[in-house]
Structure formats: C-alpha cells, structure tokens
Image (cartoon, rainbow, N blue to C red):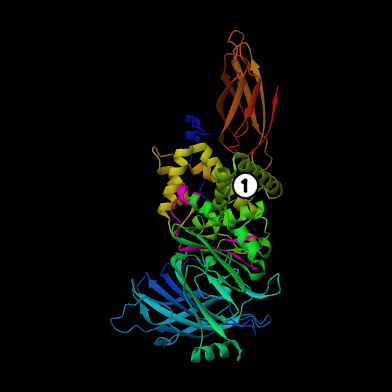
C-alpha cells in the first residue's frame, strides 16, 4: 500500500538534521588522476604459488604538474614470505601520431622509459620523468611477482583439485593487482592469464583469445612458472564496461562450462567443477535469466556483456564480481535449494546495485548490500508470491532486533570507517536494515514516487558512483512535488536504535471517537518519527441488510518521540485495531485494548 504524507509529517521531514562531525578519511581519494583502463597479465604455476605479473595502467591526469602518483599494491612480508616485489616500472612511449588504445602487448613488449618508484607497505609510488598536464592520458607498466597473502586464493577445492580464485572484497585486490583499490575508481580491464593447459580461466567481460602456446612464448611461460615440461594456454578476457576493483574476477580450475542461453543477446554461462557438471548445470540454469528480466524491467538495462555463475572456493556464500559471479564450493547441490536460489538472485541484483551503480566509498556500502537484499525480496514477491516476500522481510526484522539488542549505537552509513576491513565494512545490518529502509521508504512515499526515483537514480549513476546523499536527492526531486527526506534518511541510516512501541486503544462512546495512545518505550536513547498505517474494523450495523460485511478502514497515525494520543471519529465502536497490517514499518509494538 501507499502511505500518504499527512501535513504533520511533512513538517517533521523538513527539519534539518544536525551536521555530523566527520572523522578523517583513512583513504583519501586521489582526484588528480583517473584510471581509465588496466591490462593485467599474469602467469600461474603448479610448481609454486608465486605469480608473475605485468600490469599496464592507462591514466588520465586531472591536474597540471602532477609529478608522482600512488597505486595500491601489497608489499613483501618477509616473515610470511608473501606480498609482491616490483622489479620495474616504466612509462609506455607513444610513437608520434599513434593514438591507439591500450591493449595487451604480449609478444613485443612496448617501448618504455624506466621510471623511479618506491614500494612501501601497501603503496607503490611512481615518479614521472616529466610532470603531467591536465587532460593528458599516459600509460604505465609495472612488472612484479610474489605470493599473494590473500585476494587470490590458491589451493585445493572440495575435490582436491588445485584452483585459483580471486577474493578481492573489500580492499584485497591490492594483494595481487596494482590498482587504485577503492570503490570510487572504476575502470575497464583486461585479464590475460597464462596457466598450465589443464586450467580453464574465467574473468570479467568477453573472451577475446584462447591460445595453446608454442615456440618462444611457451618457453617463456615454462621458465616463468618453473615448469619446463608443461604445456601452457593463454586466456584473454576483456571487460569493456568500467567496474570497481573488488569486482575484478579471476578463476582458474578444471571447469565444466555450459553456455545455456542468452539474455538481451548476452551470453549466459555456468562454470562449475568438472566433477559437478550435471548438478551444477541444473542448479544454475534458474532463476538467472528470469531475475535479469525482472531487474531490467523494473530498474533499467543490464550494463554488461555476459553473465556467468561460477562455482569457486574463495567465497562462502556469493560474490557479485561483475559478469562472473562466484558461489561457494558447496553451492552445487543438484536440488536447486531455496537458500542458493536466493543467493543467486541477490548476486544478480548486485549487477545493478553495487556493480553498475557503485557506492562512492565503503561508508556507503548499504547502497550495494541493502539494495541487493531488498531487490532480492522484490523478485521473490514477483516470482514466488507475497508470502515468500513477507517471510524474508520478517526474518530480516528479527535479525535487526537481535543485532540492536547487542549494538544499539550501530549506524548503517559509516563516518569515515577506520580501519577498513572485511569485518568493519559490512555487518548484517547493511543487508537487512538497508533493505528494510528501502521498504519503509517505498511505503511512505508510495509506488509512483519510489519507482520513478529508483529508475532515475540508476539512469543518473549508471556505470558511476553515488553517495547516500545522491540517492536521497534523487528520491526527493524526481517526482513532483519535491519533498525533503533528510530527517527520514538520517534517523534510519545515521543514528542507531530500533523503535519499540507500546500502544493501547479505547472507545470513547460519548464522543464517538477511537482513542489511541502510543508511546516509544526505547531505552537506547534514539527516537523515531514515522507514519504508521492502522486498519480499523467496524462491525455491520443492524438493518444494513444481508451480506453486509464489517467495514475495514485504513488510517494512519504518527510515531513520535515520547507519548501521544490520537482521536479518530467513527460512527460506531470498532471491533479491532491493527497497527501496520501490511508490514511497512520496522518496529516492535505491543498493542492492547484498554
Ligand atoms: Zn551482497
């Protein structure tokens, strides 16, 4: 249902939220440079977990006089014998007049000028031979090797086969790829992998080349990998739509691959371990296409060039890597379980939310997880019915209640998170409370405003980045007349707490009024203001004729700080008063007739 905005709540919503004192950003963005494109060339081996890499990076300079810049790349840890060692950094010299886009340069290394560099703990600083000018596009090439501590998982899968799988979330790409390893920096990329020929290699985008190496190239691969008698294959994938670094994917394993269909002329693929071929092809064939259709219809067009569901041993649940979604080792059951079905829908929803429209910072990660969670529920409602939707919503609510009992001050939008890590960036609340927030927003502003805002937000930030404020402004202004949602956003996203309410109702026969008393009984120090729909049932009256039904009226009262009393005039005494009958409000309420 749509909840109308009564005039009282409009006034409340127009109140300005207090300015929050911001902590220092632990990852200052480098706004002097913009990465346009990466080419990651990697050699994988069975003789060692060491990888050999050459990364070419194409950068547009956004300021005059830039003399140096930094990439994220994990340094060597002598105790663990992990990390990356950089052997050379160069700038690719463009021949006069050549304006060729950067692409893989394999057989003939490009002409390059050696550059000075410094590689500290997790940062690679590159010194330019000549300062950059604003607008210049220049290309750099980094040669390195080492054993990844994390970020790229090299080990045995559940069948005892050796595999390689990326595991970049939230800032682990730097452990094996020199990048600007932050969600704000989106770029196109190529993954050019040389691996023993019993591996098949999956990555983002489209397959450009697969070649069994011969001659000098084979010798070079054998030497780099320390496997003199091994045959090697080169596999080259190209992602032509910009994405953030945590979405760069690499999987190398003995795969069975099913090209089972198309969506919007884009290939749909299943990649599972060869031992799981039959069950895996069955499991992943649905509901991928159906979910993509639903999200295209309701949000906007799918941004990418293919979609592969990939079994991997680098994740427990799922990881939404763009166009190559990873699912855990145990995701293949042959039974199309509800649990994994929901994971598939969630990761596909991420292709729209998180991947195409990306949070501008880790602080806003709910824009990815909360959206993916809510759009999973919306697909479930569409495909499996209202009960399935409500089941998900109710389960999420219980998790939020349990969480806030333990951590009442937890906020959904972070304030310059420190440290940035896997256990700090996300908690369940990014998913469940983020999702519930969107649900409440939809209930409060109504279907038309909600959906036109959602589509406009997707259109505006398509292949870009957005903050929570960007989202709020779109939801405020897309639909006429504009509304102010500052307070609504801040009370649910920038403060902790969970609304606990007590209400009772009574019939004032003298005045023909239903009297509702409502109290926020929170002891966590947070108060909420929000409309709550109520359903009032009044009985049939004598003489209304056979077949007359009890009347159900829908009204709305406002949840306010402290205690409030609302009087609603009715022509007869109600038999029942139900708060939030359609589950639009995140709250716990104890309700009685006085
Ligand atoms: Zn997710």
Indicate whether residue 248 is drawn in magenta: no
Q: Nearer the viewer, residue 216 or 44?
A: 216
At x 64%, y 70%, the residue is: 274
Task: Name the spot of residue 486 as percent of width and height, x first.
Answer: 49, 43
In the image, is residue 516 above or below residue 94? above
Which sits in the foreground, 361 or 96?
A: 96
CB of mark 1 near ligand 1 (< 8 Å): no
Identify which residue, 206 or 567, lies in the foreground.
206
Rendered-image quarter of ligand 1: bottom right
Toward the viewer: 410 or 377?
A: 377
Image coordinates of residue 32 in percent, x first then y, are 41, 69
User: Residue placed at 46% from the left, 51% from the top?
Assistant: 296
SS label for mark 1: loop
Residue 470 located left or right of residue 545: left
Q: Which residue appears farthest toward the top when viewing the image?
A: 543
Question: Which residue of the protein is positioned furthest toward the left in this rendering?
Answer: 97
Residue 542 visible? The answer is yes
Q: Quadrant of residue 92?
A: bottom left
Q: Quadrant of the C terminus?
A: top right
Label tally: 1
Label 1 neighbour load within 10 Å: few <14, some 14-19, many 20+ = some
Q: Which residue is mark 1?
A: 496
Q: Residue at x 57, y 49 (%)?
A: 376
Is 460 displayed left or right of 354 in the figure? Answer: left
Identify which residue is drawn at 56% across, 79% down: 120
Q: Residue 152's x, y, as percent?
A: 61, 73
Residue bounds of the magenta highlight: 294-319
Question: Is residue 312 one of those drawn in magenta?
Answer: yes
Query: Can residue 25 be spotted in the picture?
Result: no
Tell me: residue 544, above or below residue 479. above
Q: Position of residue 468 (x, y in %)?
A: 49, 51
């Amino acid at each position: 249902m749509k909840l109308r905005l009564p005039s009282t709540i409009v006034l409340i919503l127009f109140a300005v939220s207090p300015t929050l004192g911001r902590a220092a950003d632990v990852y200052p963005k480098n706004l002097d440079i913009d990465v346009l494109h990466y080419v990651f060339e990697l050699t994988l081996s069975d003789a060692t977990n060491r990888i050999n890499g050459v990364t070419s990076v194409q950068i547009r300079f956004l300021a005059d006089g830039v003399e140096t810049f930094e990439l994220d790349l994990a340094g060597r840890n002598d105790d663990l014998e992990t990390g990356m060692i950089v052997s050379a950094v160069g700038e690719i010299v463009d021949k006069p007049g050549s304006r060729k886009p950067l692409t893989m340069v394999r057989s003939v290394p490009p002409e390059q000028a050696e550059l000075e560099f410094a590689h500290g703990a997790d940062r690679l600083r590159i010194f330019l031979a000549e300062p950059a000018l604003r607008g210049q596009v220049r290309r750099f090439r980094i040669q390195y090797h080492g054993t990844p501590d994390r970020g790229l998982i090299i080990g045995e899968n559940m069948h005892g086969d050796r595999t390689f799988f990326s595991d970049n979330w939230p800032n682990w790409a730097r452990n094996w790829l020199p990048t600007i390893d932050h969600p704000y920096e989106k770029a196109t990329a190529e993954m050019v992998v040389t691996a023993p020929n019993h591996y098949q290699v999956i990555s983002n985008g489209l397959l450009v080349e697969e070649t069994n190496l011969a001659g000098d190239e084979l010798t070079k691969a054998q030497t780099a990998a320390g496997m003199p008698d091994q045959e090697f294959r080169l596999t080259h994938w190209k992602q032509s739509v910009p994405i953030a670094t945590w979405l760069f994917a690499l999987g190398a394993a003995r795969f069975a691959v099913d090209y089972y269909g198309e969506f919007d002329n884009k290939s749909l693929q299943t990649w599972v371990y060869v031992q799981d071929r039959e069950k895996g092809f069955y499991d992943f064939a649905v509901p991928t296409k159906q979910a993509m259709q639903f999200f295209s219809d309701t949000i906007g067009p799918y941004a990418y060039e293919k979609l592969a569901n990939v079994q991997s041993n680098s994740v427990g649940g799922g990881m939404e890597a763009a166009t190559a979604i990873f699912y855990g080792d145990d995701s293949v059951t042959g039974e199309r379980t509800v649990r994994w079905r929901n994971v598939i829908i969630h990761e596909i929803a991420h292709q729209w939310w998180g991947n195409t429209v990306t949070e501008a910072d880790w602080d806003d990660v709910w824009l990815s997880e909360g959206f993916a969670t809510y759009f999973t529920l919306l697909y479930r409602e569409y495909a499996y019915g209202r009960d399935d939707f409500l089941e998900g919503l109710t389960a999420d609510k219980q998790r939020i209640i349990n969480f806030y009992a333990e951590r009442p001050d937890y906020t959904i939008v972070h304030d310059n998170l420190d440290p940035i890590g896997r256990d700090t960036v996300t908690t369940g609340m990014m998913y469940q409370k983020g999702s519930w927030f969107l649900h409440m927003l939809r209930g409060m502003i109504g279907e038309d405003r909600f959906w036109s805002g959602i589509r406009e937000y997707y259109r505006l930030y398509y292949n870009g980045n957005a903050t929570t404020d960007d989202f709020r402004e779109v939801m405020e202004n897309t639909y006429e007349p504009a509304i102010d949602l500052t307070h609504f956003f801040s009370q649910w996203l920038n403060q902790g707490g969970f609304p606990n309410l007590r209400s009772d109702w009574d019939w004032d026969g003298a005045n023909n009024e239903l009297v509702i008393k409502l109290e926020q009984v929170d002891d966590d120090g947070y108060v909420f203001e929000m409309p709550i729909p109520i359903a009032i049932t009044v009985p049939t009256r004598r003489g209304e004729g056979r077949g007359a039904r009890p009347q159900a009226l829908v009204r709305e009262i406002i949840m306010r700080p402290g205690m409030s009393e609302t009087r609603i005039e009715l022509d007869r005494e109600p038999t029942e008063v139900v708060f939030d009958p359609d589950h639009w409000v995140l709250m716990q309420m104890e309700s009685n007739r006085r």
